[in-house]
């Protein structure tokens, strides 16, 4: 192929590539700029929509603030606030659906009705005097304004959309805490018609999104991804109904809802956003689906001061539609430019190639011994000398190449016979030649291994890197006269190969400067392993002799101490049990029995002070019997007389028994008593000894109530794993005195209490926590305590599930 044809093709290609690159870059810039502008327009529309929704909710918040400070609502008397709120709901129609007045125990009043038998509280059947009241304690707005409002602040909260207990319709509740004299006495909530929320969203679509050339696919979700508004009505939350159209109720008798979630779309990008990665402000997430290969954009913003997320879906084709039309027009322009570039390339190639073709023709003629006339500006003598010079160089190159091939062949045979790996480091370009044996020694294939020094530093052991660099620098600088060292290189399969590395420097004859470093690697793994084995055996033998001698001495000393401690402990136990034996139960049971009979027969007959004395006798007798039982149980566990009887532990039933046992005692001290467990706890109970579990919780709950003078005591149950084993954890938390950290280590020791001063005020032997620890360990469980002085304590008991 002639040079002019090559130049024509090359110039055509260069002009075409450069022109196309300019146009493509321009279109790419325009596309990106257009896309960003379009996304900014959408962001602005979405932000305005979010602010509009926030403003509408703010109006409700302002109205609610006026109501909660009104005299009627502050009274807390339903006979006063209910007529007032019923009048206000008529005045606020059609904006508000109803008012909800929630109490700290979870029951509530509302302006839509009530059970006259229950003081107008809302119940499951407002016409039935025995109907249980509804309870909103699980609603998020009750939790935010009452349960989690320990500081008694006038908190305002916008709920997630929900299905109303009383009407069965979708609603949103805006609730505020009612605070009087520094405490929360309830909440006042406004139920908004969901249809008004939907109407607002439709207005936002018309006001802010109608200017776009594509349909606005707007959605409203909560932070968990549940759809509350969607362009597809089938995905919106609905009341769950049976085949007869009746509401399906849950275990507590509340209507259930059918909720669709954005995570059900199985789009990883959207699932990640709604898995705790929602960000403030307007955000853009790009994703693809099988139906829309070019891609889709999800633009969203969290509505301020709420748990709502306003989102929009738009496809890339819809976003870049106008730009696509513009690109089609540019395609015609590109074709015209290509034709013009091709014509220009042919012309330029002719101008460049003509003199070169004439020179090439003359050189070819000279190489054949022909003398051809050439232009005077070509200087014929110089061209002839140039041709001869190139011919001489070619012959010398062929001879040198033959000699080099012979030398390399001999060297390769020698290296194969020695089974050594060769490396040759060119310091000028920092490239290294690795022989095939060098590479296969480490388990790699020679093809594609590379020639960089970084490859060597990738396989060398990290502890040997500095030693190799220091050794090489010392050798190259002349501080040492030879390079020889052992190092470790990482084999492909992960283990390290011990290598003996030797090298010598190749220096420039004229300057004496080192230009190459050539060396060999010898695999000495077997030798190193054998030496290490011998050294290890010697060291191990010495250590075993020393260790065995020390162990024997320590064992003897520990045995003597253990024997003395055991004898002392048995003596103390014998003295104690001699005073607190089984014979104490007989007179004590008689005392308790006679006291109970006298209380029963003389109730209302004798004077109150005498009756109080009888009750004191009965109460102290039971307490003394409880102490004796604790002592005997502790002794029984130590002696192995007590065994566990496993059966299903029903947490709701267990908590109900504890509540009945301690409610009066807690009310007497003026403290709150809370019992918490998950809704599905019936399906996740455990197998253990119910009597001993009750005994454990009884001791902990009794201590919590005993040492708490104000605040609350709570006990909760939740399913939890411990050391990869399934089980259940019980947490008993109080707001009592707390325990000092130095005392925590001895807290579970027998006859130990947190504080002697407390012991003098509150009775107890200090065996309760010891019994808790022993019974927990009999279940193969664990008990822990966390406490802060002046703030309270939390005891946690984990019991494994011994399901057969």
Image: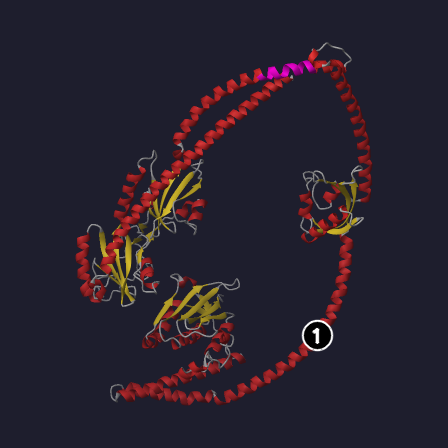
Q: Examine the structure image and report whether residue 87 is included in the region drawn in magenta.
A: no
Look at the image and tell me whether residue 244 can be seen.
no
Task: Say which of 475 and 157 sits in front.
Answer: 475
Coloring scheme of the render?
Answer: secondary structure
Say which residue appears at 39% left-offset and 77% top-offset. Answer: 706
Element under disc 1: helix
> Is 146 left, or right, of 494 in this rendering?
left
Q: Position of residue 275 (x, y in %)?
A: 43, 51
Figure quadrant of the N terminus: top right
Q: Quadrant of residue 3?
A: top right
Q: Main structural element of the magenta stretch: helix, strand or loop?
A: helix
Task: Say which of 312 and 721 sits in front.
Answer: 312
Q: Position of residue 529 (x, y in %)?
A: 75, 56
Look at the image and tell me whether residue 504 can be seen.
yes
Other-residue count near label 1 (Cα within 10 Å), few / some / many at <14 / 14–19 / ≥20:
few
Q: Position of residue 435 (x, y in %)?
A: 75, 40
Measured along the vertical axis of the image, is residue 786 above or below residue 49? Answer: below
Measured along the vertical axis of the image, is residue 403 above or below residue 537? Answer: above
Q: Examine the structure image and report whether residue 354 is included in the region drawn in magenta.
A: yes
Say which residue appears at 37% left-offset and 73% top-offset. Answer: 658
> Is 108 left, or right, of 583 in this rendering?
left
Q: Position of residue 241 (x, y in %)?
A: 30, 51
Q: Quadrant of residue 82?
A: bottom left
Please count the marks in the image. Answer: 1
Task: Say which of 137 and 89 sits in front.
Answer: 89
* Residue range (magenta): 348-359
> Is 778 left, or right, of 53 in this rendering?
right
- Can you identify the residue that label 1 sits on? 550
């Amino acid at each position: 192929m002639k040079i002019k044809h090559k130049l024509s093709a090359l110039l055509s290609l260069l002009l075409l590539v450069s022109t196309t690159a300019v146009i493509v870059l321009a279109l790419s810039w325009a596309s990106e700029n257009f896309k960003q502008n379009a996304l900014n327009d959408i962001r602005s529309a979405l932000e305005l929509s979010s602010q509009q929704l926030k403003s509408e909710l703010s109006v409700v918040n302002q109205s609610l603030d006026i109501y909660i400070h009104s005299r009627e609502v502050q009274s807390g008397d339903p006979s006063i606030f209910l007529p007032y709120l019923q009048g206000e709901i008529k005045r606020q129609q059609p904006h508000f659906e109803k008012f909800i007045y929630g109490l700290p125990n979870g029951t509530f009043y509302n302006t839509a009705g009530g059970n006259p038998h229950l003081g107008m509280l809302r119940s499951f059947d407002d016409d039935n005097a025995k109907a249980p009241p509804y309870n909103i304690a699980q609603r998020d707005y009750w939790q935010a304004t009452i349960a989690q409002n320990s500081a008694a602040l006038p908190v305002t909260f916008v709920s997630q959309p929900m299905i109303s207990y009383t009407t069965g319709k979708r609603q949103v509740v805006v609730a505020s805490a009612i605070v009087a004299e520094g405490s929360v006495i309830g909440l006042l909530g406004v139920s908004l018609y969901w249809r008004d929320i939907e109407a607002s969203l439709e207005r936002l679509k018309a006001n802010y999104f109608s200017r776009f050339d594509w349909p606005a696919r707007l959605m409203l979700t909560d932070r968990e991804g549940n759809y509350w508004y969607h362009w597809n009505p089938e995905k919106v939350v609905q009341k769950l109904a049976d085949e007869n159209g009746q509401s399906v109720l849950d275990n507590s008798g509340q209507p259930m809802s059918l909720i669709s979630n954005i995570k059900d779309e199985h789009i990883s990008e959207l699932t990640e956003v709604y898995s705790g990665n929602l960000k403030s402000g307007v955000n853009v997430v790009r994703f693809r689906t099988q139906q829309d290969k070019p891609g889709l954009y999800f633009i969203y913003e969290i509505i301020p001061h709420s748990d709502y997320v306003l989102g929009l879906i738009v496809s890339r084709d819809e976003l870049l539609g106008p730009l696509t039309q513009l690109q089609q027009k540019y395609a015609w322009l590109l074709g015209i430019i290509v034709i013009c570039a091709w014509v220009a390339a042919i012309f330029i190639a002719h101008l460049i190639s003509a003199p070169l073709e004439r020179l090439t023709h003359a050189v070819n003629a000279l190489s054949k011994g022909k003398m051809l006339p050439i232009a005077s500006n070509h200087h014929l003598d110089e061209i002839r000398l140039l041709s001869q010079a190139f011919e001489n160089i070619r012959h010398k190159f062929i001879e040198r190449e033959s000699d080099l091939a012979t030398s390399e062949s001999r060297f390769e045979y020698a290296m194969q016979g020695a089974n050594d790996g060769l490396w040759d480091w060119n310091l000028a370009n920092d490239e290294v030649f690795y022989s095939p044996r060098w590479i296969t020694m480490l388990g790699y294939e020679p093809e594609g291994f590379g020639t960089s020094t970084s490859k060597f530093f990738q396989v060398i052991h990290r502890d040997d890197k500095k030693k190799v660099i220091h050794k090489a620098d010392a050798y190259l600088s002349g501080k040492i006269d030879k390079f020889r060292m052992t190092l470790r290189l990482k084999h492909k399969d992960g283990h390290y190969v011990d290598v003996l590395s030797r090298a010598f420097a190749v220096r420039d004859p004229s300057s004496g400067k080192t230009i190459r470093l050539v060396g060999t690697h010898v695999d000495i793994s077997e030798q190193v392993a054998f030496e290490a084995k011998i050294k290890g055996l010697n060291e191990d033998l010495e250590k075993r002799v020393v260790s065995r001698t020390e162990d024997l001495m320590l064992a003897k000393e520990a045995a003597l101490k253990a024997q003395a401690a055991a004898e002392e402990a048995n003596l103390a136990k014998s003295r104690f049990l001699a005073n607190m034996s089984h014979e104490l139960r007989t007179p004590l049971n008689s005392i308790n029995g006679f006291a109970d009979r006298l209380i029963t027969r003389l109730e209302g007959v004798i004077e109150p002070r005498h009756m109080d004395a009888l009750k004191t006798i009965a109460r102290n007798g039971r307490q003394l019997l409880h102490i004796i039982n604790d002592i005997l149980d502790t002794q029984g566990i130590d002696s192995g007389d007590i065994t566990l009887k496993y059966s299903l532990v029903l947490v709701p039933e267990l908590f109900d028994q504890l509540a009945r046992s301690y409610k009066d005692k807690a009310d007497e001290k003026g403290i709150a008593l809370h019992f918490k467990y998950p809704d599905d706890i019936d399906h996740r109970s455990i197998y253990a000894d119910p009597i001993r579990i009750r005994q454990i919780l009884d001791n902990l709950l009794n201590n919590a109530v005993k040492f708490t003078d104000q605040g609350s005591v709570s006990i909760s149950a939740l399913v939890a794993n411990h050391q990869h084993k399934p089980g259940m954890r019980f947490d008993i938390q109080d707001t009592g005195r707390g325990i000092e950290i130095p005392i925590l280590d001895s807290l579970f020791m027998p006859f130990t209490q947190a504080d002697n001063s407390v012991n003098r005020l509150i009775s107890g032997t200090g065996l309760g926590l010891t019994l808790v620890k022993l019974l927990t360990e009999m279940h193969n469980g664990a008990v822990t305590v966390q406490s802060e002085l002046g703030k309270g304590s939390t005891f946690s008991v984990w019991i494994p599930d011994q399901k057969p």
